[in-house]
Amino acid sequence: MPKKIKKKKKVKPKLEKSKNLKKIVTPKKISITDQKIEIKKIKKQPTEKKQYNINDYVVYPKHGVGKITAVEKATIGEIGINFYKILIERDKLTLTIPINQQSHLRPISSINQINKCVSILKTKPKIKRTMWSRRAQEYEQKINSGKIYELAEVVKDLNKTSNTIADQSYSERQLFEQAYDRLQSEFEVVLKISAEDTKKKMDKALGRNQIIEMEQ
């Protein structure tokens, strides 16, 4: 009889525990009640003392004379901001200027400064012999500087005289009128006179009344 062949038992290899294996810790579930609710605080703009009040007249360089109609607060991007509301009457425009940027504003001129402007208007214009594009850029910078004496200089230098009527270009006329209107608006507020009387005073200093008579 044939001998029975004994089947060898399969020995399962023992898995050695690696010392380097770390236990995986499952995160505990956090309930909504356990979570702390963070309260966001509204940041405030850098504190700066208010220099102007409601109904004060100020000059904003790029727009001229304006009147402060309100001082308000607002929250923009989680930052609390205090600002002035300024009405530019001539342009029918309301500006919003943060109080921490009030250095861009200046108070209106004194009567002595207005009188000095009148003296500037009476002097002869200084016409540089440079290209008009360069001069126009200089005039624009003076107009937007917010400095009243520089504004008066532009009005004086671009004033239409009997010798330059035909030579005055459209861009020259535009710059002259812009400077003239801004200067006139400050004259009105400081001297507390009507627009018509202000115009007469400025035209007299510029000698424009004589030109009108000659043209007639």
Image (cartoon, rainbow, N blue to C red):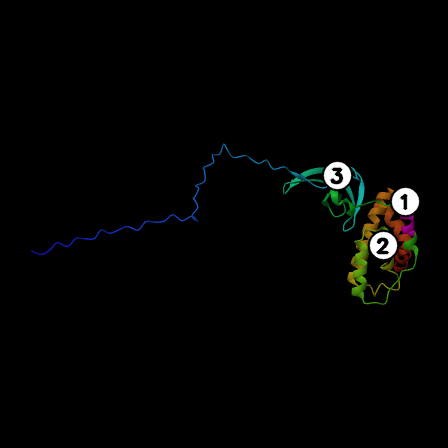
The quarter holding residue 162 reads: bottom right
Q: Relative to residue 138, is residue 49 depicted above or below?
A: above
Pointer 1: residues within 10 angstroms few (<14), some, or many (20+)?
Answer: few
Nearer-N-terminus badge (3/2): 3
Report the amino acid beneath label 2.
Glu
Residue receiving disc 2: 150
Q: Mark 3 or mark 1, which is nearer the start of the sequence?
A: 3
- The number of numbered discs placed on residues in the rendered structure image is 3
Can residue 54 be found in the magenta stretch?
A: no
76 with respect to 153 (left or right): left
Residue 6 percent across, percent down from the top left:
16, 53
Element at badge 3? strand
What label sits on residue 111 in the rendered view? 1
In depth, the one of 36 and 134 nearer the eye is 36
Range of magenta residues: 110-118
Which one is nearer the viewer's eye here, 166 or 184? 184
- Provide residue 50's location: percent of width, then percent of height: 77, 39
x 81%, y 42%: residue: 57
Specify the label residue 69 is tagged with: 3
Q: Position of residue 54 (x, y in %)?
A: 77, 37
Q: Secondary structure at mark 1?
A: helix
Q: Tell me the CA gap for discs 1 and 3.
A: 24 Å
Instruction: In the rendered view, tell whether residue 187 sits above or below residue 212.
Output: above
Secondary element at image label 2: helix
